[in-house]
Image: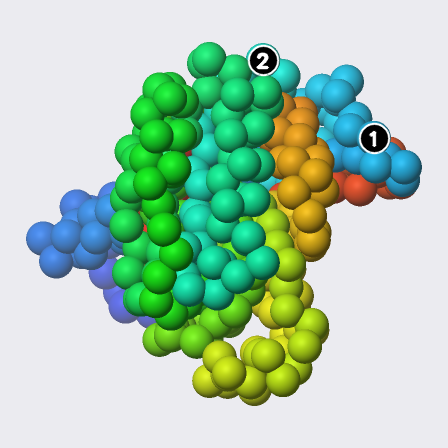
Amino acid sequence: MIGIIVHYRKMRLTKWAYFLFVFVIFHLGERPLSFSQEKKRQEITYDVAVTAISIAVSVQNKKGRHITDLTKEDFSVYENDQEKEITYFSHDYEAPLSVTILLDVSGSMALQDKLSESKDALDYLLNHLLSDRDEVSLLIFADGEVEVAVRFSRDKKHFLAVLGKTEAYGQTALNDAVGVSPDFANRGNNEKRALLLITDGIENDSEYSPGQAIEVARRVDIPIYTIGYKIPLDEQFLRKYKRAEGLTASGIVESLEGFSEATGGRAFFVNNSLDMKNAMRLIKQELSHQYILGYTSYMDPDNEYREIKVVTKKKSYQVRTREGYYSGEKKDAR
């Protein structure tokens, strides 16, 4: 009031003018917003959209044994190093699975009985590892195309009948197949979903590089489990298929590991049917032991990439989940 009084004396205002002046000063902040101001405030409000993020998490001790007795309070989730409140938690060993098989049926899979032995291992997966409540689908890829051979179903006999008729042909667009398949795998009806890639790793027909395939696969919350089967070690043999410098034995391993690590899955490299079946057993076991965590974040029109980190109270535990996601795309709330 001192400032107002001083101002009043300087201006020699009348008594009524003074009261009018005070009234205007005290009510200036309460005047209604103009149409343009109100519209701008609404636009700001509408631009902030919240989305639900779900992540599948596997926890093991140093010996590789799955930890199955954790609670919501045992986990902390960070997005770009900022801790997020966990708003959803599920851990059910008996929960049904939705598994998509992404099978390489290119010409190189006909060599060394790779395709026939893969079929045998898949028969073992369906008849001895998956339950009647689990559903499975089949994608096959060769010559730059990914074909939906079997849609999601619990009919294991139909799956195996279609699989039995599948033959190897053509070239391998492995990176392209990895890029487009997670979106289909995400259509499974169960909360726990996964993509199982079976390939010899020979790549000679893709538009995508391995890095580009990973970036596309990251846009969907699907862990990719990879079985690299009888990867060629002979550089002279690989030269017949070579289109890029990365087509070496070590390059194949690096690419397949990259697909799995980025999405929260695991990569296995085996050379006989028995080891492939064991890899499938370990994958089934891990999927059943998974924790599903959820939190909310805001969508970003700039579609920035956000890193995800999950830790447990016991720091010695090994935690595996997807590395991150793109913020401009709506996520499955599950």
Q: Which mark is residue 65?
A: 1
Using the image, determine if residue 142 lies above or below residue 93. below
Circles 2 and 1 in contact, beta carbons < 8 Å: no
Judged left or right of residue 169, residue 285 is: right
Q: Secondary structure at mark 1?
A: loop
Question: Label 1 neighbourhood size at 10 Å, few (<14), some (14-19), many (20+)?
Answer: few
x, y (%) of residue 103? Answer: 44, 49
Whether residue 149 is visible to the viewer of this picture, yes or no, is yes
Q: Is residue 79 left or right of residue 204?
A: right
Q: Residue furthest front?
A: 112
Q: Position of residue 265 (x, y in %)?
A: 61, 46
| Residue visible at 60% across and 40% down in the picture | 84
Image-quadrant location for residue 229: bottom right
* For residue 22, above or below residue 249: above
Q: Badge 2 is on which residue?
A: 94
Question: In this rendering, does residue 52 appear at all?
Answer: no
> In the rendered structure, which amino acid carries the disc numbered 1?
Arg
Left or right: 236 as drawn, with respect to 330: right
Residue 27 in the image, given as x and y percentages of width and height: 26, 45
- Quadrant of the snapshot with the C terminus: top left
